Amino acid sequence: MLVASVCHIDLETLMTLPLREIADTGIRVTPIALGCWPIAGVTSLNVTEANSLATLQAAVDSGINFLDSAYCYGLHGESDLLIARALGHRRDELVIATKGGIHWENGIQVKDGRSETLLRQCDESLTRLNTDRIDLFYLHAPDPKTPLAESAAAMKQLLDAGKIRSVGLSNASREQLAEFHAVCPLAAYQPHYNMLQREIEASQLPWCVEHGVSVMIYWPLMKGLLAGKLPRDFHFDPKDGRRKYPMFQGDEWQKNQDFLDALRPIALEAETTVAQVVLNWTIQRAGITVALCGAKRPEQIQDNAAAMTWSLAPDQIARIDQAIAARGPVVSRAAV
């Protein structure tokens, strides 16, 4: 077994883990966060309540202080409720982000960025989390039926009322970031980003760097693909949502397996896991503040958390960048 895999971090290391400020808010977070979508069990398979509670506990015990949830993580707010159950007694040690603007109707996610909806969902999330403040509250996605300025004004109202400490926007274009920021100051932006999906580098990321907005990326491991644990002949369960993504199909799947084979010698050299190599590269990228790592079992988040306790060497980063270039453009849009 590789020495850095699935490890428990000692207290001395925990005390020296690097923290990064969210914009200029004074809120400081670890560069690896726990993404709480999987523990809600909506699309992830084999999720149990016991494992979800243990995963939350393991994240904090591994040094992570930042949890990322959402109103729609769970058909009835399961993610927020689990956080309160598992870690309510440690609330002051945590930075909790959650999101509003998406809810479920008859098993389908519906966007609703109206002012009254965001105000109500914030109050509901405060109740679910059993807390008096949300550290970072995102508009989960712009609602095409609601003017973005209306959504931003509602978030500003929540900020001014002290119910939230900072404001974020997720899944938005550069133009939408600018429009929102003109009404309500943005502290954070949350897009997908990983070694193979780097579209934001040409647009949103430079805007965020210019305006001092922190970038909290999700899918750093591309739904487990870049963890390097799925063999070439892996057969997905028919209920597995990953089957709809081209990254997990046909030629794209084989190219991605070739790419992972190029990362394995670097992981062996660093005496760590492929997942940690990928995450460490990600949090060293200019402009990236935090990588959100989804997990549904304790050992997954323990391994991910260890990625922030060491650093890739410059020559290793250069070799990774060469492997990315050799992989070439990817087809990543999900099938409809």
Image (cartoon, rainbow, N blue to C red):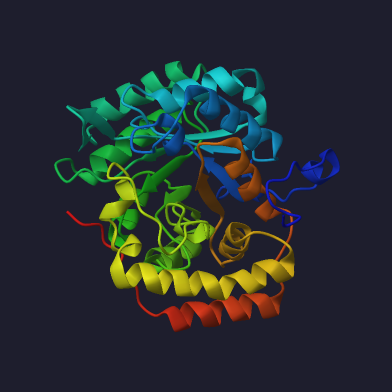
| Residue 169 horizontal/vertical position (percent) | 37, 46
| Residue 59 horizontal/vertical position (percent) | 63, 37
Q: Is residue 5 left or right of residue 116?
A: right
Taking the spot 53% from the left edge, 20% from the top edge, the residue there is: 84
Taking the spot 50% from the left edge, 63% from the top edge, the residue there is: 209
Location of residue 265 by image quarter: bottom right
Q: How many marks?
A: 0
The quarter of the image holding the N terminus is bottom right
Q: Nearer the viewer, residue 128 or 78?
A: 78
Taking the spot 58% from the left edge, 21% from the top edge, the residue there is: 86
User: Compared to 312, does 56 lie above or below?
Assistant: above
Q: Is residue 69 left or right of residue 66?
A: left
Location of residue 277 by image quarter: bottom right
User: Compared to 172, does 162 lie above or below?
Assistant: above
Q: Find the residue positioned furthest to the right.
A: 12
| Residue 130 horizontal/vertical position (percent) | 51, 16
**Residue 21 seen by the camera:** no
Taking the spot 54% from the left edge, 28% from the top edge, the residue there is: 51
**Residue 127 seen by the camera:** yes
User: Compared to 71, does 148 lie above or below?
Assistant: below
Q: Is residue 305 left or right of residue 253?
A: right
| Residue 93 horizontal/vertical position (percent) | 67, 29
User: Compared to 247, does 104 lie above or below?
Assistant: above
The quarter of the image holding the C terminus is bottom left
